[in-house]
Image (cartoon, rainbow, N blue to C red):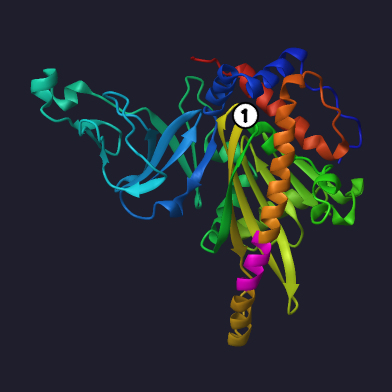
C-alpha cells in the first residue's frame, strides 16, 4: 500500500457540488438520478422465490418493484402508465401487476395488455395504446440482484462492472441460505458519510473503543487496500496477492475467510467477512451484507443482513450437533456487537451531517482513509459524465 500523502483530489467546484447534495433537496435529486444509471444492488433472489413474488426498492431516487414472472425476474418503476398510481404498496407481496386505481394489468414486459373497456374509453385496443412501465435493467449474480435505468450512453454489463467481485459474489451466494438475522436503521445523515465511514479505518479507536478499537490503531503495515474499477477492498494482514488469491479460491469454490476483509461495491453496497469467536477449536464467521438506502439529503436507511459462513464438512454427527447448538448462542452474541458498532457509526454520521453546511474545504485524509479518496473520485467521475434530466 502506498505511503505517499493523498492529493486534494476534487476541484473546488466538485467539492461544492458534493456539499450541495448534503443540504439541498434539488442537488440530492440530481445526484440520485446519476446514481441510477450504474448497477445498484436491489436485493436477493431468495426474497422472491415463487411466481409473482415481488419486493419494492429505490433506484435513482425513484420507487421501483422487482418481480419474479414465469419468464424470469424483471423490474419496473412503481407507477402506473395511466395516472402514475403506485402499483405496489408495502415492502413485499405476491400477485399479478394490477393497478388498484383503474385495474390496468401489465405483463412481464411491463406492457398494459389488460385495460378495462379500452376501445370505449380510449378508442384503441390495448396493443395500440402501447402503454408501458418504465423498465429497469436487471442482472443476477448468484443470489444477488442488481439494477440500473437505461441511458443513451449505455454502460458495462454486470460482469465488467463488478470485475474481480463477480466470481466472489457468485461463490458467496451459497451462504445466503444461512440467515442469522439483520438490522434496519434510519440515520439522520446524507448517504455518503454512511458509506465513507465503512471506508475509514482511522476512526476505530475513537468511535469503537470497546470493540474494533480495543486493540488500538491498526499499524500501517497491517492492511492491504485494493482498488478495482469504482470499487475497493480492505484485507487485514493482507498483501498484494490477497485479492487475486480470493478470486481464484472463489472460482474454485474453496474460499473460506481466515482474516477480516471487506468489499465496498460502488455506489452503496458493503460486504464484509467477520470472525465472531472460536469454539472447540473452530472459528465462527459471518458474512455481513449492508445496503445503504438514501431517502433524502439528510435521511438514510441502512439494511444489514447477517449470514453464517459454513464450516468445512464433517462426518461426525456429534460435531455437527455441537456446531448447531453453538451457532444459536453465537448468533445472539454477534448480533449484539454488530448492532453496537453500527449504531456508533450512525451517531458519527449524524454528527457529520450537522456540519454539512460548513463542509467546503478538502478533507485531510489519513493513510487509513485512502479508500474515501477513491470513492469520491469515482462519484465525481459519474456526476460529471451523467447529464441530468430534471
Q: Measuring 64% from the left and 49% from the top, which residue is drawn there?
A: 271
Identify the magenta region.
327-335
Q: Is residue 224 above or below residue 365?
A: below
Visible in this render: residue 84? Answer: yes
Give residue 147's position: percent from left, percent from top.
Answer: 48, 37
Which image quadrant is residue 7 in?
A: top right
Which image quadrant is residue 131 in?
A: top left
Disc 1 secondary structure class = loop
Q: Is residue 100 left or right of residue 343?
A: left
Visible in this render: residue 255? Answer: no
Q: Measuring 79% from the left and 56% from the top, which residue is drawn there?
A: 211
Q: Dot 1: within a 10 Å radius of its alpha carbon, few (fewer than 14), some, or many (20 or more) residues?
A: many
Is 89 covered by the magenta stretch? Answer: no
The residue tagged 1 is 298
Q: Which quadrant holds the N terminus?
A: top right
Q: Is residue 123 above or below residue 304?
A: above
Which image quadrant is residue 296 in?
A: top right
Furthest-left residue in this view: 120
Give residue 4's position: percent from left, percent from top.
Answer: 91, 32
Give residue 49's position: percent from left, percent from top.
Answer: 38, 55
Secondary structure mostly seen in magenta is helix
Q: From the viewer's side, name the closer residue of 372 and 221.
A: 372
Q: From the viewer's side, name the closer residue of 315 and 197.
A: 197
Q: Is residue 236 above or below residue 198?
A: below
Give residue 83's position: percent from left, percent from top.
Answer: 28, 23
Q: Is residue 301 left or right of residue 360?
A: left
Q: From the viewer's side, name the closer residue of 383 and 230.
A: 383
Q: Is residue 171 above or below residue 139?
A: below
Q: How many marks?
A: 1
Q: Measuring 77% from the left and 18% from the top, which residue is drawn there?
A: 360
Q: Is residue 72 left or right of residue 351?
A: left
Q: Measuring 77% from the left and 36% from the top, which residue is drawn there?
A: 371
Amino acid at each position: 500500500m502506498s505511503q505517499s500523502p493523498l492529493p486534494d483530489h476534487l476541484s473546488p467546484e466538485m467539492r461544492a457540488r458534493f456539499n450541495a447534495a448534503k443540504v439541498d433537496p434539488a442537488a440530492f435529486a440530481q445526484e440520485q438520478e446519476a446514481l441510477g444509471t450504474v448497477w445498484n444492488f436491489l436485493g436477493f433472489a431468495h426474497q422472491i422465490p415463487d411466481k409473482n413474488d415481488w419486493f419494492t426498492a429505490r433506484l435513482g431516487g425513484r420507487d421501483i418493484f422487482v418481480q419474479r414472472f414465469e419468464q424470469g425476474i424483471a423490474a419496473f418503476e412503481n407507477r402506473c402508465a395511466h395516472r402514475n398510481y403506485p402499483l405496489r404498496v408495502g415492502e413485499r407481496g405476491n400477485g399479478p401487476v394490477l393497478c388498484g386505481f383503474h385495474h390496468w394489468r401489465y405483463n412481464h414486459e411491463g406492457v398494459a395488455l389488460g385495460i378495462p373497456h379500452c376501445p370505449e374509453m380510449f378508442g384503441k385496443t390495448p396493443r395500440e395504446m402501447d402503454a408501458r412501465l418504465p423498465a429497469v435493467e436487471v442482472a443476477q449474480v448468484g443470489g444477488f440482484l442488481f439494477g440500473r435505468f437505461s441511458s443513451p450512453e449505455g454502460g458495462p454489463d454486470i460482469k465488467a462492472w463488478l470485475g474481480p467481485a463477480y466470481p466472489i459474489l457468485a461463490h458467496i451466494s451459497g451462504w445466503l441460505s444461512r440467515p442469522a438475522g439483520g438490522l434496519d436503521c434510519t440515520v439522520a445523515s446524507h448517504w455518503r458519510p454512511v458509506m465513507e465511514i465503512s471506508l475509514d479505518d482511522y476512526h476505530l479507536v475513537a468511535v469503537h473503543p470497546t470493540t474494533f478499537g480495543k486493540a488500538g490503531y491498526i499499524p500501517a503495515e497491517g492492511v492491504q487496500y485494493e482498488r478495482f474499477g469504482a470499487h475497493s477492498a480492505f484485507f487485514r494482514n493482507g498483501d498484494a496477492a490477497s485479492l487475486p488469491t480470493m478470486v481464484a479460491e472463489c472460482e474454485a469454490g474453496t474460499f473460506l475467510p481466515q482474516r477480516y476483509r471487506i468489499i465496498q461495491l460502488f455506489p452503496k453496497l458493503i460486504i464484509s467477512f467477520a470472525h465472531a469467536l472460536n469454539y472447540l477449536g473452530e472459528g465462527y464467521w459471518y458474512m455481513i451484507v449492508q445496503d445503504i438506502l438514501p431517502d433524502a439529503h439528510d435521511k438514510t436507511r441502512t439494511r444489514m443482513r447477517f449470514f453464517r459462513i459454513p464450516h468445512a464438512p464433517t462426518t461426525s454427527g456429534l460435531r455437527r450437533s455441537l456446531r448447531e447448538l453453538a451457532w444459536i448462542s453465537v448468533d445472539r452474541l454477534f448480533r449484539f456487537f454488530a448492532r453496537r458498532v453500527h449504531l456508533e457509526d450512525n451517531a458519527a454520521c449524524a454528527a457529520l451531517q450537522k456540519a454539512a453546511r460548513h463542509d467546503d474545504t478538502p478533507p485531510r485524509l489519513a493513510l487509513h482513509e485512502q479508500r474515501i479518496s477513491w470513492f469520491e473520485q469515482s462519484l465525481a467521475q459519474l456526476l460529471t459524465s451523467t447529464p441530468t434530466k430534471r
